[in-house]
Image (cartoon, grey):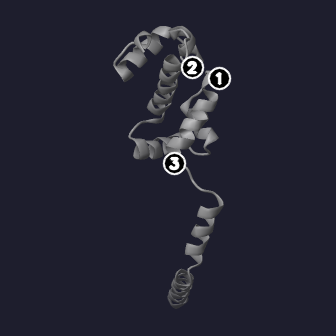
Amino acid sequence: MAAVRQQRIAERALSEAGRAASGDELRREERRARVRPESTLADRVRAWVESRVDEGNVSVARLADALFMSRSKLHRLLVEETGRSPGEFIRDVRLGMARQMLQEDSASVSDVAYAVGFSSVSGFSRAYSSHFGEAPSDT
């Protein structure tokens, strides 16, 4: 029984070595890279948030579902890539959009706050001030 098990292990090892030597795995990875170029997770998260920010119900749970991963995996990967949690990253994207809107448009602070998904102007002003070091009305 043990001899059969050892033989199977040896056959499997030889088989895997043969595949590695033939370059099958490498060719598969090269094909994958050509077929669908991967963007970074941060780019995908940013695009998702920007496309849904006006809906007002952007959440980490919905983001994880949209990316087909668990919340914990999303958290781990995003922190690894950006150093920020998904919640912080979503807030930063919203604030960046708000800053751009305030600089380009003549919209009021309250219009911008609601447009980027904040539910209160005071919460938006507090987050904006702590993030950029200036009041949104000064932008």
* Distance of label 1 from label 3 (alpha carbons): 24 Å
Q: Is residue 76 left or right of residue 119?
A: left
Q: Amino acid at mark 3?
A: Thr
Q: Residue at x 37, y 22 (%)?
A: 132
Residue at disc 2, secondary structure: loop
Q: Amino acid at mark 2?
A: Gly
Q: Which mark is residue 40?
A: 3
Q: Which residue is mark 2?
A: 117
Residue at disc 1, secondary structure: helix
Q: Residue at x 47, y 24 (%)?
A: 95
Q: Is 2 above or below relative to 97?
A: below
Total number of numbered discs in the rendering? 3
* Residue 6 x, y percent position in the rendering: 50, 87
Q: Which mark is residue 55?
A: 1
Query: Foreground mark, 1 or 3?
Result: 3
Q: Quadrant of the N terminus?
A: bottom right
Q: Is 114 above or below relative to 60?
A: above
Using the image as rendered, state which of residue 34 and residue 76 is in the foreground.
34
